[in-house]
């Protein structure tokens, strides 16, 4: 099938799968499972792939990889990835299909991601006679874990290492449904965390001279830490270093012996990211030495910055224009949130598309990770069509 006939067939298939994609989204939204515990989610994904006649493999405990081999495959491999885990949040929506699992909710759109990839599987399976590549359907667990995330382990699989290209999308409530954004370069920030333990000498609050106060040392360190971004980093490089937890002492008249600080460091510059641990420790060591304390720094490398490959973004923009139209393809600034899809992009060219899922008139603009998060489901078939058009567009160019 060629040209206009292929596009007509695609449009027909997209129309036909709309109810299916919505049904799948409702099912997964009602049955969320937290990171590394997505057993029933994986089983339902396998069940659906089995119904479609798509072979699959269980990997990394709760991950699933399905394979569609085009009839005219050149041997080139395209990976399409969806994350499948939910968050430990008590849902506060009034949806008919709200979470059945107390304290767990799909508050980041991963239910939609699963549904769209299953819809994509259905369409591509119907078009496999026209496919000139092999498509790997990657259902990845544990995206929400910063350090020990699913992509860390999935990216080490031989099946993934052999990919020639990889793509994903993230549904985004800040963008109106019917729009999308994809450009080359940074799209989401690196996301690292750290624990700092500062030790002093405890004693009576009325006799601070006989103590080494870890609260004062920690406070001085927190203030000095801000100079990394304000005085050491090029203002044109976006960076954030935040202390988000400061725990020390439990009494009004006792100076404690230690303090525990936790924080995050983020940037779009992966080279700069590698320098963060040394810069933080330099200030920490100097502060503690000057104030007679000792320290321990535990720096946790999470995910690198998500940086879209130029060629992939070009293919993505061409496919997106066919789906969303010229006016629906919008400019959208890079986001400081992290996305472990970046761990694939370290070794495989690819890209991430922001898919509009908000609807201000329907009050579907709640931020991600909100207990009231919801999306406009008209975005779902658009996401499917984008994935399919991308596959058709790139299959001769990998």
Image (cartoon, rainbow, N blue to C red):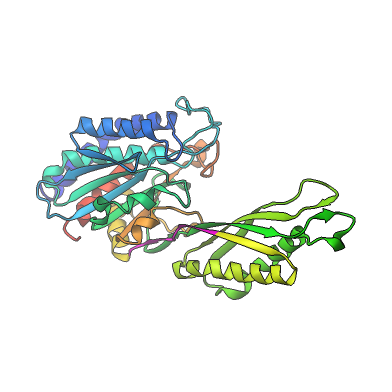
Residue 301: in magenta span: yes
User: Could you tell me which residue is drawn at 21 percent across and 30 percent down?
Assistant: 51
* Quarter of the figure with residue 45: top left
**x and y percentages locating residue 316 in the rendered image:** 30, 56
**x and y percentages locating residue 147 in the rendered image:** 47, 52
Direction from residue 377 to residue 209 in the image, left or right = right
Direction from residue 277 to residue 80 in the image, left or right = left
Residue 241: in magenta span: no
**x and y percentages locating residue 279 in the rendered image:** 57, 70
341 relative to 289, above or below? above
Q: Quadrant of the C terminus?
A: bottom left
Direction from residue 268 to residue 391 in the image, left or right = left
306 relative to 85, above or below? below
* Quarter of the figure with residue 348: bottom left
**x and y percentages locating residue 53 in the rendered image:** 18, 34
Prevailing SS of the magenta stretch: strand
Q: Is residue 327 visible?
A: no
Residue at the right extreme of this rendering: 206
Q: Where does the magenta region start and end?
A: 299-309
Q: Is residue 1 visible?
A: yes
Q: How many marks?
A: 0
Depth check: 183 or 267 in front? 267
397 relative to 355, above or below? below
């Amino acid at each position: 099938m060629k040209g206009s006939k292929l596009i007509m067939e695609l449009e027909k298939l997209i129309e036909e799968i709309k109810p299916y994609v919505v049904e799948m989204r409702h099912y997964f939204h009602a049955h969320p499972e937290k990171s590394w515990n997505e057993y029933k989610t994986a089983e339902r994904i396998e069940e659906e792939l089995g119904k479609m006649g798509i072979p699959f493999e269980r990997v990394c405990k709760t991950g699933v990889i399905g394979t569609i081999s085009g009839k005219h495959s050149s041997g080139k491999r395209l990976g399409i990835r969806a994350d499948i885990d939910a968050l430990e949040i008590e849902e506060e929506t009034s949806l008919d299909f709200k979470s059945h699992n107390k304290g767990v909710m799909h508050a980041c759109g991963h239910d939609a991601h699963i549904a769209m990839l299953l819809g994509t599987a259905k369409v591509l399976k119907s078009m496999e006679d026209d496919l000139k590549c092999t498509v790997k359907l990657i259902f990845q667990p544990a995206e929400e874990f910063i350090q020990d995330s699913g992509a860390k382990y999935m990216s080490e699989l031989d099946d993934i290492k052999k990919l020639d290209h990889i793509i994903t999308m993230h549904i985004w409530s800040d963008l109106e449904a019917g729009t999308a954004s994809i450009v080359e370069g940074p799209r989401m920030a690196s996301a690292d965390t750290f624990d700092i333990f500062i030790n002093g000498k405890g004693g009576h609050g009325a006799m601070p001279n006989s103590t080494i106060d870890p609260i004062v040392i920690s406070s001085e360190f927190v203030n000095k830490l801000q100079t990394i971004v304000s005085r050491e980093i090029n203002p044109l490089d976006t960076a954030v270093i935040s202390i988000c937890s400061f725990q020390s002492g439990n009494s009004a008249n006792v100076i404690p012996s230690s303090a525990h600080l936790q924080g995050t460091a983020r940037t779009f510059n992966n080279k700069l990211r590698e320098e963060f641990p040394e810069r933080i420790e330099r200030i920490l060591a100097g502060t503690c030495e000057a104030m007679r304390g000792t320290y321990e720094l535990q720096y946790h490398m999470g995910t690198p910055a998500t940086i879209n490959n130029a060629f992939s973004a070009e293919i993505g923009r061409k496919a997106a224009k066919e789906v969303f139209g010229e006016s629906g393809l919008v400019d959208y600034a890079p986001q400081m949130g992290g996305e472990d899809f970046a761990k694939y992009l370290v070794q495989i060219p690819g890209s991430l598309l922001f898919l509009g899922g908000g609807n201000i008139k329907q009050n579907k603009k709640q931020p991600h990770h909100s207990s009231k998060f919801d999306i406009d489901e008209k975005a779902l078939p658009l996401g499917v069509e984008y994935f399919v058009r991308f596959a058709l567009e790139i299959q001769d160019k990998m």
